Structure formats: structure tokens, C-alpha cells
Image: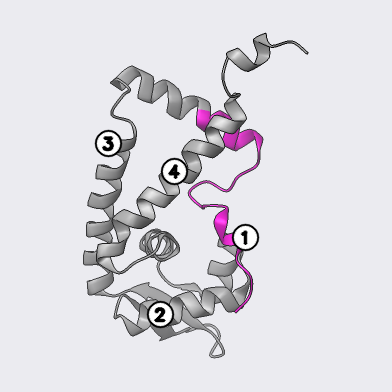
Amino acid sequence: MNSSKYRSGPGPAFLLAQIGAHAARRFAERLAPLKLAPPDAGILRILRGSPGLSQQELAGRLGAHPSRVVALIDGLEQRGLVERRPNADDRRQYSLFLSPQGAATLEDIGRVAREHQEDLLRSLDKEERRQLAVLLQKIANAQDLTPGVHPGYRMQRPC
């Protein structure tokens, strides 16, 4: 057994998993005072960029089971963050929109996200951050990850 492999430390895949799990946990903790979870924040962000999506379209974009998305939207609607409006093209569907309160909440989420990123990357200078982003994007592209969508939605089981 070559002991030099073990002295060099963990490999990049392990480090990505370790940092990813840590970052996800810390982001969830930072969202907790807003009474939100990361999936809520992701949905609000998507609806800002694509107002009027149907629940089915949103589920497809997230790669999530439609019943899971319905439950998430129900919670966001009850809190006044999302509005369901009749779909002009299909009366059987609703179009999803951010409410004014949802838009304001998204501003709070943005502040939390910026603080989270700064805290997470504080040991890197500006050029190292840029290089890291380029390399991580290259990996994400090679893995066919959907830009801007956390793969955790796919792991959710139907409600």
C-alpha cells in the first residue's frame, strides 16, 4: 500500500462534497430566521426570472415530482409570497407569480446569499474566486447540471 496517497489529503471529489454539504447546511441556517428553507428560496428566484410558470413547468425545470412542487407552492402561497393566478391559455392550470411580499423577501434572501458567499469564500482573493467559479462551472457543465437549479430537488420524494 502506497502511504503517500494518504498523506496528500482528501481528493477533490471528497472536498467538493464536504464543502457542498457544509455550504448547504450553513445556507439553510442563515435562511431560518426568514422562516424559509433553501427550496423556497430557489423557487422564489426562479419565479422572479420566469413569472407566469405553471406548477407543472416549474416541476419540470426543477426536475422535481409535481406533488412536491404543489406542497412547496402551497406553503409559499399561504405565507403570501407567491400568487396563483388563472392561466389565460389553460383554465385547468394556474400561473405562478411572486407577490409584492415575495419580491421583498427575495431581496432579503439575496442579502443572506451574499453574506453566505462572502463568509464561505473569505479565504480566497478576488482572482482565486474567479478561478474557482470558472472551474466549478466547467465541472457543472460536464455533469449536465441545470444552470441555477440545485440538484437536491430531484432527491425529494413525493408528498
Q: Residues within 10 Å of mark 4 (few under 14, many from 20)?
A: few
User: Pointer 3 and pointer 4: residues touching (CB < 8 Å)?
Assistant: no
Q: 10 Å neighbourhood of mark 3: few (<14), some, or many (≥20)?
A: few
Amino acid on which the number 2 mark rests in the picture: Gly
Which residue is at the front of the view, 124 or 142?
124
Q: Earlier in the sequence, mark 1 or mark 2?
A: 2
State the quadrant of the C terminus: bottom right
Secondary-structure class at tag 3: helix
The picture places residue 67, in percent across and down from the top left corner, at: 59, 79
Q: CA distance from mark 3 to mark 2?
A: 30 Å
Return the disc, 3 or 2, that comes first in the chain's sequence: 2
Part of the protein shown in magenta: 136-159
Q: Quickly name the residue at label 4.
A: 22
Q: CA distance from mark 4 to mark 2?
A: 26 Å
Which of disc 1 and disc 4 is earlier in sequence? 4
Give me the C-alpha separation between circle 4 and circle 1.
19 Å
Q: Amino acid at mark 3?
A: Glu
The residue that disc 1 covers is: 154
Question: Label 2: few (<14), some or many (≥20) within 10 Å?
Answer: some
- Which residue has dot 3 on it? 118
Write the residue at 66% across / 9% down.
4
Count residues near mark 1 (Cα–Cα under 10 Å), then give few for <14, some for 14-19, many for 20+.
some
**Circle number at residue 75:** 2
Amino acid under disc 1: Arg
